[in-house]
């Protein structure tokens, strides 16, 4: 498997966060990446959390809970292959999960969000 990863590396969470920031900005929504994986959308009161493994999601749980307590809408973006595990990690939280698939040129293609 390591050989496949070397030939076809997956985009990191930080890389995808920058792409998400550019997509929102291009659509007219101000966006800013904070701490490499949180895309803050201040005008809409939303944060998109971009994770490339479940461990990052687990480590960010306290931050996500604090955002929710402040009334911030939270969307967690992660590779589609991790959606099942992510659902288990955030069960009972009022957030959405959105998977991405690798598109052409290593650019992610996002699927529709799901309620956690």
Image (spheres, rainbow, N blue to C red):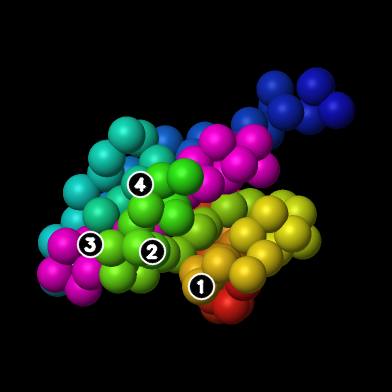
State the mark number for residue 94. Answer: 1
Magenta segment? 41-61
- Dot 1 and dot 4 residues touching (CB under 8 Å): no
Q: Earlier in the sequence, mark 3 or mark 2?
A: 3
Look at the numbered disc 1 and give the secondary structure of its residue. loop
Q: Residue at x 36, y 70 (%)?
A: 73
The Cα atoms of the two marked residues, 2 and 1, are separated by 8 Å
Neighbours of disc 2 within 10 Å: few (<14), some (14-19), many (20+): some
Q: Quadrant of residue 42?
A: bottom left
Image location of residue 4, percent across then percent down:
78, 29
Between label 1 and label 4, give the one nearer the viewer.
Answer: 1
Vertical position of residue 96 compared to residue 18: above or below: below
- The span from disc 3 to disc 4 (Cα, nearest Å) is 10 Å
Q: Are marks 2 and 1 in contact (CB under 8 Å)?
A: yes
Q: Is residue 98 left or right of residue 45?
A: right
Q: Which residue is mark 2?
A: 68
- Disc 4 element: strand
């Amino acid at each position: 498997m390591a050989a496949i990863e070397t030939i076809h590396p997956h985009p990191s969470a930080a890389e995808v966060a920058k792409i998400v920031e550019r997509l929102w900005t291009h659509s007219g929504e101000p966006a800013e990446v904070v701490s490499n994986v949180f895309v803050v959308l201040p005008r809409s009161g939303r944060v998109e959390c971009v994770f490339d493994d479940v461990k990052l999601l687990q480590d960010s749980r306290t931050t996500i809970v604090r955002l929710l307590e402040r009334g911030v809408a939270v969307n967690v973006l992660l590779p589609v292959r991790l959606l099942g595990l992510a659902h288990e990690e955030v069960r009972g939280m009022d957030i959405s999960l959105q998977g991405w698939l690798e598109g052409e040129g290593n650019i992610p293609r996002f699927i529709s969000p799901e309620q956690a």
